[in-house]
Image (spheres, rainbow, N blue to C red):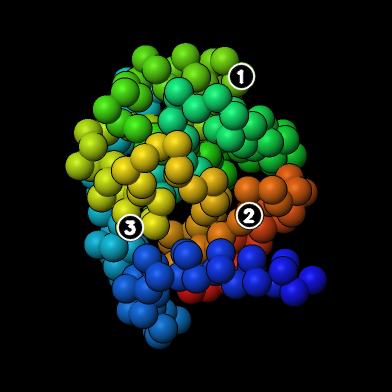
């Protein structure tokens, strides 16, 4: 139990540190209008353009974060174990979300190896994992852009083989973000996503 609690604390800190600048400005978020919260989040997360597995361009905040409850993970297409395994685990989450997946909830798999992960490589990876689906975007951009985005999320690494498997879920419209262990049961992930949608999730 002590070890489990320690792991939970370390995971909390790993996400709290990069989000601190965003969170500190939201301590009085209840006094902000919805538009003000959106603009504050847009300023923090940025609105860089990413390209998905179909070659479609998306603005990170405006098109993705601001429109949905998101579940974010980090992958690279040459990964032989952790990335395919996590993608397969997320399939169980997707199935339990039912018809709301793709509308209320979306998954964003961000490449930590943008030099090699072009849209074609992401497409092949998604198809191999049976995850090439509406509502599941496998995203890449130039290295500077990915470093910026993943850096804000505390997820960038110069060595893709050592990338984090932490899951990040959020409701940017209400400034609610949570971190999830990669081995969280699918049922727990679904429960947490629904809490985000109902605006009762933990707030950083």
Contact (Cβ within 8 Å) of mark 3 with mark 1: no
Contact (Cβ within 8 Å) of mark 1 with mark 2: no
State the CA–CA distance, disc 3 to disc 1.
29 Å
Residue at figure coordinates x 72%, y 35% from the top left: 92
Q: Nearer the viewer, residue 117 or 5?
A: 5
Secondary structure type for disc 2: loop
The residue to which callout 3 is attached is 152
Q: Position of residue 151 (x, y in %)?
A: 32, 54
The residue to which callout 1 is attached is 130
Q: Position of residue 154 (x, y in %)?
A: 39, 57
**In the picture provided, is 94 more to the left or to the right than 123?**
right
First in sequence: mark 3 vs mark 1: 1
The residue to which callout 2 is attached is 181
**In the picture provided, is 2 more to the left or to the right than 63?**
right
State the CA–CA distance, disc 2 to disc 3.
19 Å
Can you tell which quarter of the image residue 142 is in? top left
First in sequence: mark 1 vs mark 2: 1
First in sequence: mark 2 vs mark 3: 3
State the CA–CA distance, disc 1 to disc 2.
23 Å
Tell me, for residue 62, which label it has, or none.
none
Q: Position of residue 130 (x, y in %)?
A: 61, 19
Secondary structure type for disc 1: loop
Q: Nearer the viewer, residue 55 or 114?
A: 114
Q: Is residue 111 visible?
A: yes
């Amino acid at each position: 139990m002590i070890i489990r609690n320690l792991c939970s604390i370390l995971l909390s800190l790993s996400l709290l540190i990069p989000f601190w600048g965003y969170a500190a400005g939201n301590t009085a978020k209840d006094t902000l209008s919805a538009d003000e919260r959106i603009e504050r989040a847009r300023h923090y997360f940025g609105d860089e353009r990413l390209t998905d597995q179909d070659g479609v361009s998306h603005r990170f905040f405006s098109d993705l974060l601001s429109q949905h409850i998101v579940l974010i993970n980090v992958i690279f297409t040459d990964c032989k174990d952790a990335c395919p395994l996590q993608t397969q685990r997320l399939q169980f989450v997707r199935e339990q979300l039912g018809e709301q997946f793709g509308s209320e909830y979306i998954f964003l798999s961000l490449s930590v190896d943008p030099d090699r992960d072009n849209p074609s490589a992401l497409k092949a990876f998604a198809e191999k994992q049976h995850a090439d689906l509406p509502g599941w975007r496998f995203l890449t951009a130039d290295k500077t852009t990915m470093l910026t985005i993943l850096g804000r999320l505390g997820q960038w690494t110069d060595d893709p083989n050592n990338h984090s498997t932490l899951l990040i879920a959020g409701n940017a419209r209400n400034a609610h973000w949570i971190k999830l262990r990669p081995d969280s049961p699918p049922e727990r992930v679904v429960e947490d996503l629904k809490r985000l949608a109902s605006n009762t999730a933990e707030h950083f």
